[in-house]
Image (tube, helix red, strand yellow):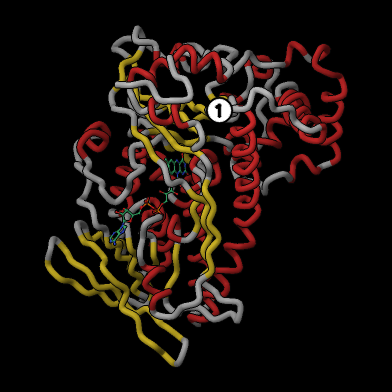
Amino acid sequence: MAERILVIGAGMAGLCLALALAPTGREIVLVERDAAPPQESADQAFFDWNRRGVGHLRHSHAFLARLRNLIKDNHPALLARLLEAGCREIGFADMLPERLKAEYRPSPGDADMAVLTSRRTTLEWVIRDYAETLANVSIVNSAIVRSLVIEVVEEGQLRVVGLKGEVAGEPAEWRADAVIDAGGKNSQAIEQLIEAGAVIGEECEDCGILYYTRHYRLLPGLDEPPRNKAPGTGDLGFIKYGLFPGDNRCFSVTLAVPEIEMALRQNVVRPEVFDRICAMFPGIAPWTDAARAEPISKVFGMGDLKSRWRSLVAADQRATLGFFAVGDSLIRTNPLYGRGCSFAAIEAYILRDVLEETADPAARARLYDARVKAELTPYFDDMRSQDRASVRRAKNVQDPAYVAPLRARVMTSFLNDGIRIALRSDVALMRAALRDFHMIEPPGVWLKRPGNLAKVLGVWAKGRRRNADLYPPSPGPGRGEMMRGLGLGAEPVAG
Ligand SMILES: Cc1cc2nc3c(=O)[nH]c(=O)nc-3n(C[C@H](O)[C@H](O)[C@H](O)COP(=O)(O)OP(=O)(O)OC[C@H]3O[C@@H](n4cnc5c(N)ncnc54)[C@H](O)[C@@H]3O)c2cc1C
């Protein structure tokens, strides 16, 4: 008989699990606390879907190529539906700087280096709708899981056999061969296991930023502004920004503000301040200009962003049987890198392979843990070290007297005058680096290849003056200029 798998949550990880496991013939039941989405349109999902279970639902989202390709290869009909609903693919050629576009010749593999982007409500609405068409997948809506049903197999050995909770306020209990926690960052399932005696390790660190997103729609009859030389993303040390083209003539802008920028973070949530900041970035201003687009949302803010990794297999290799975690309940990452949904999908497909490979619950737990670590640790570590560097930089930017030590100056120059400028001068190098960005290849591998490193060093050695035409325009004002422009000092402005 086919195994019955219970999944806590029908968010991104729950849906990825449905996509990964349904074709194996297992019965997949997703237990979701929130109500089903409105069925009419992407706009209705955006404006009316009450999703208390996902606080970040209305923040900008994009799927990296790694996830987009998993969808394309395993569920091509879903990719078609996403595009039909208005989701956008930003391809390799679209991501090239203007001067490289002219000399670009497509190469095999380029077509699979596309970001899939739209409002998250649209992505989730379409994936959910598609998942429910899969024969052996069902979603129980308005059903909150209160606890795992745990058995003690022998001393120190736990097994999860089901879930208890409520459906529309009525008590409910579900039994299964395996339970997967896809309940997101606030899921309590792992806490319950720890209370029951499971040995679970955790590494956790602040990302050091807060996230602010506002959505806009192009005015009737107007198109997106022509791409100019100014980039749609930028990192000024005291603020980072990103433009996300969306579905159905929508787009969003996300600003990431370091935790220590108190005045900025307290004011950026005010729509007029958010829009004034957008007007200071040359790559964003033509989009948010009131003559071209109108806001369709308030400014959504989000804090408490963490990098967190939980290990469900103890040092003595013991693990709770019949239990797995996928998505943010297992690993949380800084949203800046746009990797959370790809992480969830990769974990879901690793779990599929493990469930197919062995029926032994202890072996399943160990294999899943080892393969997730092997695949995702390099990305996790890389993001965390970038976050630590950003936190240091944000602190230094606040101090006008700060002078970086020589080593730091050389490293910054290697990044800004070497790597970044070399990428802007060479399509092949850009292709190699974007494979890293899209999680097609582990972080940093491209730069270790001698040919690539030699090209970067060659560009760096030419120096700023001779490379002058390769530099992009300034991404925006300095800290003092922005603060003065906004009327912000060290303290937040009133009102
Ligand atoms: C601001 C922000 C921006 C991001 N941008 C990107 C991006 O651009 N690209 C990207 O790849 N990733 C992004 N991420 C990360 C990505 O959103 C998460 O990694 C992803 O949502 C994780 O999926 P999940 O299913 O684990 O959690 P969620 O998507 O949060 O889903 C959890 C689900 O479980 C349900 N649930 C929880 N508890 C219970 C319970 N007790 N009973 C029943 N149901 C329950 C919830 O209702 C919810 O539906 C971003 C994250 C944030 C915070």
| Coordinates of residue 395 in the picture (x, y in percent) | 60, 34
Q: Quadrant of the C terminus?
A: top left
| Coordinates of residue 20 in the picture (x, y in percent) | 44, 59
Residue 475 found in image quarter: top right
Along the line of sight, the residue nearer the viewer: 376 or 487: 487
Relative to 191, does residue 393 appear above or below in the rendering?
Answer: above
Along the line of sight, the residue nearer the viewer: 478 or 105: 478
Q: Is 236 on the left-hand or right-hand side of 3?
A: right
* Amino acid on which the number 1 mark rests in the picture: Phe
Marker count (numbered) = 1
| Coordinates of residue 371 in the picture (x, y in percent) | 60, 65
Residue at the far bottom in the pictured view: 154
Q: Is 295 on the left-hand or right-hand side of 447?
A: left
Along the line of sight, the residue nearer the viewer: 461 or 226: 461
SS at mark 1 in the image: loop
Q: Is mark 1 within 8 Å of ligand 1?
A: no
Residue 14 found in image quarter: bottom left
Q: Quadrant of the N terminus?
A: bottom left
Q: Residues within 10 Å of mark 1 (few under 14, many from 20)?
A: many
Relative to 43, does residue 312 appear above or below in the rendering?
Answer: below
Q: Is 40 on the left-hand or right-hand side of 206?
A: left
* Residue 230 visible in the current orientation: yes
Residue 467 found in image quarter: top right
| Coordinates of residue 396 in the picture (x, y in percent) | 64, 31
* Residue 426 visible in the current orientation: no
Q: Which residue is mark 1?
A: 238
Relative to 252, does residue 367 appear above or below in the rendering?
Answer: below
Along the line of sight, the residue nearer the viewer: 383 or 100: 383
Residue depicted at 57% across the width and 25% down the height: 234
Residue depicted at 59% across the width and 39% down the height: 391
Residue depicted at 74% across the width and 21% down the height: 425
